[in-house]
Amino acid sequence: MSSSHDPLISLRRSIASNNPPTPTTSPDGSQPECATDNLGVATHLHFTDPESHTIPLDTPTRFFSSDKPVDLRSIYFAWQKKDVNIPDYIASAQALNDGLGGADGAGAASKVQNLVFVERLDLITWLEGASDESEYIKALESDGTAAKSAQVASGAVGGVSTVPSGAAGARPGKQVDPRLQQIYNLERRMGDRNSVLRGIKPTDFSHVRKYSETFFKDRKKTSHANAAPSATSTSLASRDKKPGRRPDPIILLSPSASSLLRMSNIKSFLESGTYIPADSSLAGSSASANILHVSRLLPSIDNQRPFRFILVETPEQFKPDYWNRVVAVFTTGQTWQFKSYKWQNAPDLFKNALGIYVGWKGEDVPRNVKGWGRGVTSAQVEKWNPAQGISGRWRDREVVEGIWDKVEESMRSKGWSKDGGPVEK
C-alpha cells in the first residue's frame, strides 16, 4: 500500500490538520448522505487531507497487538475514546461490538479489539504527533524502493540520468553541438540516495568481529593473569548486546480518597513543583483521566534524553513484564492498596520499587509507613491556604526535587540506563 494511503499515516495526517476523517457507509465518501457517526454501521473512513480517499474500516494496519494486526475500526475507535477511562472504554467497545454482531452491522469479523492501556497510550501519542516512534507499529514498506535502488546501483537500470539539451522536453529550437552530444552520451548515470546507502546486496561484517577476537586473545595472553579486562574488550562485549528501545518507567498512585496526590493534581506537582488540592478547579489534569505521563531529565542516568514516566492509579491492565518497569509507588500507608499488586506484602513491594509517602507538614508520618523501613521515603508539604493560592507554594519545589532525587537514585541502583530498562530479575 502506498504510504499516502496507509491507514495509520492517513489518520495521523488528518489529526494533525484538524480535519478528522468521516465514517461512511459507502466507498464513495463524497456523498454527504452516506456519512454517519455510528461505527456500528459504517464500513469506510473518508479522508480529505492531503487528497480525498476512502479506506475500508476492516483494513489491517501496521499496529500490532499480541502479534496480530489491529484493524482500522479498532484504531479509530481507540482514538475517539482517548479521553475516557478504562472501564468506559471497555463498556463502549462492548456496546459497539453488540451492534456490529447484528443483522445491520458490519459483521462479527469486524468487531472492535480492546487495546490494553499501554498500547492505547502509545497509539494515541503517536497519532497526535507527540512521538515519532512506537514499539507496536511495524515499519512501512517503501513500495519497492529498495529493489529499484539496488538495480540502479548495479547498473541494471538508470538512476538520475542527464537530459541533453536536444532531448525530448528541451527548449524548442536549440541545437546541440555534435561533440557535446557525444560527451553527454559518455556520461555515467548516477545513483540516487537510496542506492548509495543500500548497495546492491546486504553486507555481512561478522568476519570483522571474528578477526578482531584473535588480537584480543593475543593481548590477553601477554597481560598479567590477574589484570582487569581492558576497556576496549569490555566495550566490544557490550556492543554485542543490541540495545532495544528504552521502556517508559511506571509510577503507581494511591487510589485512596485520602491521598494528597491524585490523577487530577499529580502532573502539576511533579512537573511544575506546585501542590494544588486534588479537588481544586486549579488542578491541571482531569480527575477522570486514567493515564498520564510526565517527562523528567535524570542527569546521572541520561543527561541528554528525558525519561517519559507513565502515571496510573491501578495495575488492572498490567502485563507481567510491566511490573519490572514500576519504579515508584505513592502510598498513604493503607495496605489494601497493594491487594492487586504483584507484591502484596509491603516489605516485598518496596524492595522492588521505591515507596513515596506525602503528607502535611507538622503531622506525624503513619506508623505503617515508618515500619516499612528505608524502602519508603517520606515528604511533607505545607497545608493549602486558599487566601494565598498558588503564589504561596514556593516551598513545594524543594520537596518535589527531593522526591525526584530519590526516584533517580532508586532507578540507577536497579540498572536503568540511557539505552535500556532495569536489569532483569
Image (cartoon, helix red, strand yellow):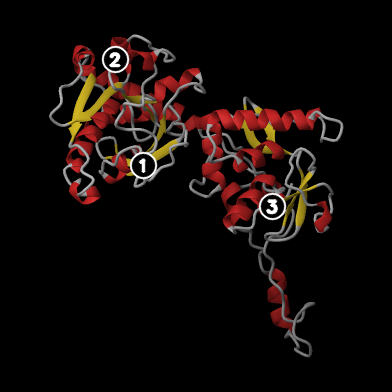
27 above or below 406?
A: below
Q: How dense is the environment of label 3, judged by Cα within 10 Å: few (below 14), some, or many (20 and up)?
A: many
| Residue designated by label 3 | 21
- Residue 258 placement (x, y as % from top left): 31, 26
Along the horizontal axis of the image, is 319 left or right of 111? Answer: left
Q: Quadrant of residue 332?
A: top left
- SS label for mark 2: helix
Give the camera-side residue of 45 and 389.
389
Labels 3, 1: front one? 3
Give the camera-side residue of 343 and 68.
343
Callout 1, which amino acid? Ser
Which mark sits nearer the N-terminus, 3 or 2? 3
| Spatial separation of the CA atoms under disc 3 and disc 2 | 49 Å
| Spatial separation of the CA atoms under disc 3 and disc 1 | 31 Å
Which mark sits nearer the N-terminus, 3 or 1? 3
Residue at the right extreme of this rendering: 103
163 above or below 192?
A: below
Callout 3, which amino acid? Pro
- Residue 411 placement (x, y as % from top left): 30, 27
| Residue designated by label 1 | 295
| Residue designated by label 2 | 351
Q: Quadrant of residue 277?
A: top left
Instruction: Examine the rendering and report whether any part of residue 418 can be seen.
Output: yes
Callout 2, which amino acid? Lys
State yes or no: discs 3 and 2 in contact (Cβ < 8 Å). no
Disc ID at residue 184: none
- Residue 64 placement (x, y as % from top left): 63, 32
Which residue: 55% across, 42% down?
124
- SS label for mark 3: loop
Along the horizontal axis of the image, is 123 left or right of 42? Answer: left
137 above or below 19?
A: above
